[in-house]
Image (tube, rainbow, N blue to C red):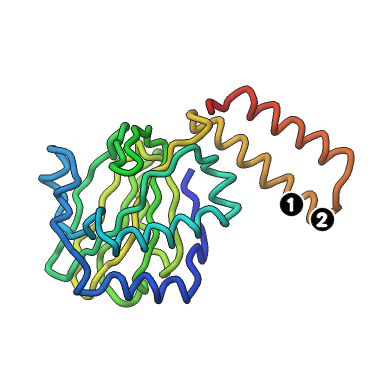
């Protein structure tokens, strides 16, 4: 499932984020955080994860995720890897095709995490740069994605993906991974579909015996599939 989270960040939050992502921020080589194979394909810069800039940006993005019902329903998050922040400049910076590591260790709070889902939060206006599309290779073929500033894309971490070269302007984004309470993608899809249909039924008809019953089905499935 590829899910667009529209306006995850408000205009005010975008302004705050961009102020923290200026040229005075502690930018380092993006390859420093990549594995041995990915280092050969990753050509960008990112904010030093142990910096004050990074901590303030992380708080901003995490707060936005926690208040977004679509993210909570689709991801069913158990742990979220602290968001990171990168930029691709118009010198052709890019990230070649790769698959994210399955297991990650966050320096803070010092724990291992299974990467079930990846999430990219777009921070630059789509018209302010050329290239830089997030390209995802899935069963339906190749999808080229470039979202509005403040929007995010949630997708399975096991998909082959890449960022195309930037040829004008500057692409700014946040990226993070989620360990879900429900490890199986197919199970998460069923729960998400059921939840979204329950939301639509309540909006159209209000609460009813049927929605109460289906809510019970949802929670019984979650009880069966979740691994807290």
In the image, what residue occupies the spot 28% across and 42% down? 107
Residue under circle 2?
204
In the image, what residue occupies the spot 78% across and 49% down? 201
Q: Nearer the viewer, residue 214 or 60?
A: 60
Q: Is disc 1 in contact with disc 2, using a CB cutoff of under 8 Å?
A: yes
Q: Look at the image and tell me whether residue 140 can be seen.
A: no
Is 65 rendered above or below residue 130?
above
11 on left or right of 101: right
Residue 124 position within the rendered picture, expressed as x and y whole percent measured from the top left: 34, 71
Is 50 rendered above or below residue 53?
above
In the image, what residue occupies the spot 57% across and 56% down? 67
Residue 116 position within the rendered picture, expressed as x and y whole percent measured from the top left: 41, 36
Q: Nearer the viewer, residue 80 or 50?
A: 50
Q: Secondary structure at mark 2?
A: helix
Residue under circle 1?
200
Q: Secondary structure at mark 1?
A: helix
Q: Furthest residue to the top?
A: 224
């Amino acid at each position: 499932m590829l899910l667009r989270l529209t306006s995850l960040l408000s205009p005010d939050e975008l302004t705050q984020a961009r102020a923290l992502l200026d040229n005075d921020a502690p930018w380092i080589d993006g390859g420093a955080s990549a594995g041995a194979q990915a280092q050969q394909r990753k050509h960008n810069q990112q904010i030093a994860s142990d910096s004050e800039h990074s901590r303030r940006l992380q708080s901003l993005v995490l707060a936005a995720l926690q208040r977004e019902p679509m993210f909570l329903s689709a991801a069913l998050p158990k742990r979220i890897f602290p968001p990171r922040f990168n930029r691709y400049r118009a010198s052709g910076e890019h990230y070649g095709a790769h698959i994210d590591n399955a297991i990650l260790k966050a320096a803070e709070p010092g724990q291992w995490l299974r990467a079930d889902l990846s999430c990219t939060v777009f921070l630059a206006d789509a018209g302010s740069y050329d290239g830089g599309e997030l390209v995802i290779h899935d069963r339906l073929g190749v999808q080229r994605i470039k979202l509005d500033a403040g929007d995010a894309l949630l997708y399975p971490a096991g998909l082959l993906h890449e960022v195309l070269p930037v040829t004008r302007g500057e692409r700014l984004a946040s990226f993070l991974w989620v360990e879900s309470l429900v490890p199986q993608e197919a199970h998460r899809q069923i729960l998400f579909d059921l939840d979204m249909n329950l939301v639509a039924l309540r909006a159209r008809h209000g609460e009813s015996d049927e929605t109460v019953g289906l809510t019970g089905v949802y929670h019984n499935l979650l009880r069966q599939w979740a691994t807290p």
